[in-house]
């Protein structure tokens, strides 16, 4: 702890690292809680307890923390962008891309071995999709990073307006479904530009932060209650509309509330992270953030596969049709965490900058 504290520059914005840590933990726990791998008849299929247990919907509010990721991304991009754009962009994109290669290589080999050993194609496809689907986040994040010089001059209201127009066209005027994919950029550009504005000294007032929290929450609730948007802030298999794929106006409003809450916690979080123990844990998590993000689904899959000879075990192999499933899943979370630590030990070096 002392070494980490001593190696931390006095200018380090610990609160930003704290928000990033909250975001990564939210994504990991959210995926582990709302993703079920069901073993049946020699195959594994992926489903979600949200499909069968609507009472779990509040979990999607607590653990869908993607807006915080983009808020922090906007803050760090705006504060780090100096000098040559080409060199700056290259450093940031290399940092994003380097940890991806081990995941792709390992899963290409794993998929080949599974198919050669007779595993069902549907099982292999489901597992590979589960691992690679979060990579959309990196593609969008990379695109917004490349657009940072433009983002610095953009008000968050502009991309928010695009999201409003797209949703009105999709749901009000029966426009083609493909139009919704415009929101994949516009929707996440809202918190990203908000982060850039925060770094530039705007939205710092307490009333502005409370306005984001209250206004975003009220708008999201109104859209769910009166406009028919889904209550879950993540995708639910079989649902006619997903708030996340692509992001809807409800998800963006929810993200604004989340950003408001994060910015309200900014100063208190910075004070807490002056404590050596809290800062050491946060710093270590941030140093491995990409590895955690890329390998947490693999950790869950590995536990599921290794436990198959003992199964089917509740909470890890069984269908999430009863509330008891959630209790068993909570029991399995430390096991998933242990498997993730093994992945970290094996692949964290890919995240370290090379000399």
Image (cartoon, grey):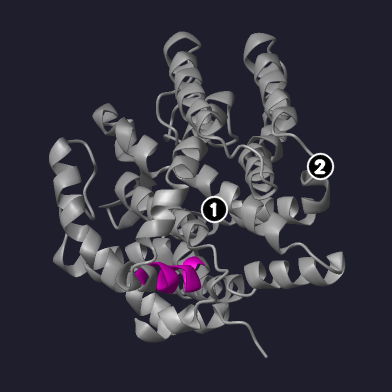
Return the x and y of residue 346 as percentages of the image width and height.
43, 83
Front in this rendered view, residue 255 or 321:
255
Q: Which mark is residue 30?
A: none
User: For mark 2, does the 10 Å Cα neighbourhood hold few (<14), some (14 to 19), or many (20 or more) residues?
Assistant: few
Q: Can residue 181 be seen in this view?
A: no
What residue is disc 1 on? Answer: 133
- Above-or-below relation of 179 to 63: above
State which region is magenta. Answer: 281-289
Give me the disc on residue 153: 2
Left or right position of 41 against 291: left
Residue 323 relative to residue 254: left or right? left
Q: Looking at the image, which residue is at 55% across and 76% down?
A: 9
Q: Residue at x 48, y 66 (%)?
A: 289
Quadrant location of the C terminus in the rendered image: bottom right
Which of 23/140 is in front?
Answer: 23
Quarter of the figure with residue 208: top right
**Image point (65%, 45%), residue name:** 192
Q: Which of marks 2 and 1 is nearer the N terminus?
A: 1
Disc 2 and disc 1: Cα gap in Å? 31 Å
Whether residue 89 appears in magenta in the rendering, the answer is no
Q: Where is residue 247 in the image (x, y as percent from the top left)?
A: 58, 33
Decide if residue 72 is on the left or right side of residue 200: left
* Residue 113 visible somewhere in the drawing: yes
In front: 74, or 29?
74
Q: What element carries label 2?
A: loop
Residue 146 picture quarter: bottom right
At 38% from the left and 69% from the top, the residue drawn is: 279
Residue 92 higher or lower than 149, as above or below: below
**Placement of the N terminus among the 4 image quadrants:** bottom left
Closer mark to the observer between disc 2 and disc 1: 2
């Amino acid at each position: 702890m002392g070494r980490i504290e001593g190696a931390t520059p006095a200018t380090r914005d610990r609160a930003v690292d704290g928000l990033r840590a909250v975001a990564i933990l939210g994504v990991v726990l959210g995926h582990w809680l709302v993703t079920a791998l069901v073993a049946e008849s020699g195959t594994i299929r992926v489903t979600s307890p949200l499909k069968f247990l609507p009472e779990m919907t509040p979990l999607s509010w607590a653990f869908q923390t993607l807006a915080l990721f983009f808020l922090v991304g906007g803050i760090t991009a705006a504060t780090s962008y100096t000098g040559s754009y080409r060199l700056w962009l290259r450093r940031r994109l290399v940092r994003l891309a380097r940890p991806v290669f081990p995941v792709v290589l390992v899963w290409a080999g794993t998929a080949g071995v599974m198919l050669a050993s007779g595993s069902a194609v549907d099982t292999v496809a489901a597992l590979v999709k589960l691992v690679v689907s979060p990579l959309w986040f990196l593609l969008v994040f990379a695109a917004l990073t490349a657009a940072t010089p433009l983002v610095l001059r953009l008000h968050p209201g502009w991309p928010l307006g695009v999201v409003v127009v797209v949703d009105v066209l999709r749901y009000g005027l029966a426009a083609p479904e493909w139009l919704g994919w415009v929101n994949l950029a516009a929707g996440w550009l809202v918190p990203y530009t908000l982060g850039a504005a925060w770094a530039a000294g705007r939205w710092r007032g307490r009333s502005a932060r409370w306005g984001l929290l209250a206004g975003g929450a009220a708008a999201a609730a109104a859209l769910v209650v009166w406009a028919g948007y889904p209550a879950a802030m993540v995708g639910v298999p079989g649902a006619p509309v997903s708030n996340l794929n692509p992001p809807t106006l409800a998800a963006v409003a929810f993200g604004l509330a989340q950003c408001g809450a994060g910015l309200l916690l900014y100063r208190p979080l910075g004070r807490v992270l002056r404590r050596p123990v809290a800062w050491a844990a946060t710093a270590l998590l941030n140093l491995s953030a990409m590895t955690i993000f890329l390998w947490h689904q693999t950790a869950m899959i590995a536990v599921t596969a290794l436990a198959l000879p003992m199964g089917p075990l509740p909470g890890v192999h069984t269908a999430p049709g009863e509330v008891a499933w959630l209790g068993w899943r909570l029991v399995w979370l430390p096991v998933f965490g242990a498997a993730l630590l093994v992945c970290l030990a094996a692949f964290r070096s890919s995240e370290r900058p090379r000399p």
